[in-house]
Amino acid sequence: MTATAPVFVVDDDPSVREAVESLVRSAGWKVQTFASAQEFLAAPRTNVPSCLVLDVQLPGLSGLDLQQELAKADEKIAIIFLTGHGDIPTSVRAMKAGAHEFLTKPLVDEDLVKAIEQALARSSNRGWPAARSAAPEGVSDIGRLAGAAVPAIGESPEWRGVLKRAMQVAATETTVSLEGESGTGKEVIARLIHRASARRGGPFVAINCAALPEQLLESELFGYERGAFTGAQQSKPGQIEMASGGVLFLDEVSEMLPAAQAKLLRVLQEREFLRLGGTRLIKANVRVIAATNRDLRDAVERGAFREDLYYRLQVFDIRIPPLRDRPSDIPLFIDAFLQEIGRAMSGRPLGVTHEARALLLAHPWPGNVRELRNVLERAAILCEGGFIAPCHLSLNTAPKRPALSLNDLGAAERQAIERVLRETDGNKAKAARRLGLTRTQLYVRLRKYDLDHGAVS
């Protein structure tokens, strides 16, 4: 069995199957569901599951019968039994036969998550690999290339367009300009291009042009010779030399002052430069990727940015959309960050209530992906029991904002559902997946908000 074997769920009730599937996914595990024991046994698979959530009362072959069949085949699977009856003899029989846990319906989410965690730990102790996903759903093979703190997550058409352009230019030596608001993931795309290029074996050197004063920026970029200025007691190579054979990422390039702009232009045109105080030309074997959260064309028109440098940087431009323009990716980020933050803080996955998720989906995210992660990290610190609720979220977009009432929560949830239904052309199954709900849970909310009109089942 591989390290990415999923949690398997066998239950003949579709609503229970979907609810458990949604919960397991939101907790950060892979999951596969079956409607009967026969379907489970007949399904082609090369690996056994690392944990099995199994209904006792199944049509045909019961859950207890399936447990015996697995035992005969010597398939060592941690089993969590579910039952709507909760009768003591059945639970005793199941536990004696080796069941890990026995839970009664209706399920308490926290109890099931805890039981699965314990089952996986038990499997790990016995040498059975755990089923935690190698990467959150929505992180493509392309996305994994980024290797940055903020993963290249997304399935929206807008994000796929960004990835497509990044892959098109990665195979070239062309200078790239990345434009987008702060927190949208410009460095993520820059690293992705680097990792997918022929320069992937070389260094990736990033410098924030807005964080350094002009004199220091020039010395950092181009290096300096001994005696070039007061305090320069020995020669020092700059970031361009340090990035030789790889990529130089210039973040917030619009903040670069005129003198440094002129020297950068020479690097792009002639592929050579001088250290500060130097007389020897040094070859610049780097690929430049520049990023800005401002309109460079506007800066040129204001005389704040050189027009010739603008055209050198704009050979191939990629515009990174803000998170509010790719709302279908927000649930993917939520699940990925909950998994990452939970693992870092407590070693266990975090959950989020449907009310809190609705608020997260409705928020405009002026700080984009970075803001979303920060909000979830703060909420993870405040929450108890591993589930983030609305009271744990800090979503203020103004200095002062009244506390959210239940009516506010309902309005936010309704808006989120309406938006996702529009984006999915009324397809309830797709909408439920994007919202992190089961279809049954979505139906309840559609009736609650009188939205069940013209949607596709």
Image: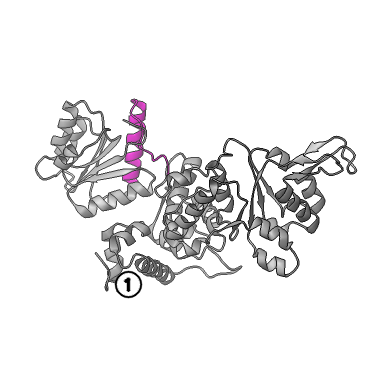
Q: Which residues are magenta?
A: 110-135
What amino acid does circle 1 point to? Tyr
Point 85% across, 41% down: residue:
278
Horizontal side of residue 265 vs 183, given as left or right: right
69 to the left or right of 25: left
* Residue 443 part of the magenta segment: no
Q: Which residue position holds label 1? A: 449
Tell me where residue 350 appears, x and y as whole percent. Answer: 43, 47
Depicted 58 relative to depicted 404: above or below: above
Residue 407 pos. (x, y %): 41, 72
Give how far across and how far down residue 79 sits, in percent.
Answer: 25, 36
Q: Quadrant of the C terminus?
A: bottom left
How many labels were placed on the picture? 1
Q: Report if residue 108 is visible in the image.
A: no
User: Front-most of 335 and 246?
Assistant: 246
Q: Is residue 285 visible?
A: yes
Judge left or right: residue 352 versus residue 282: left
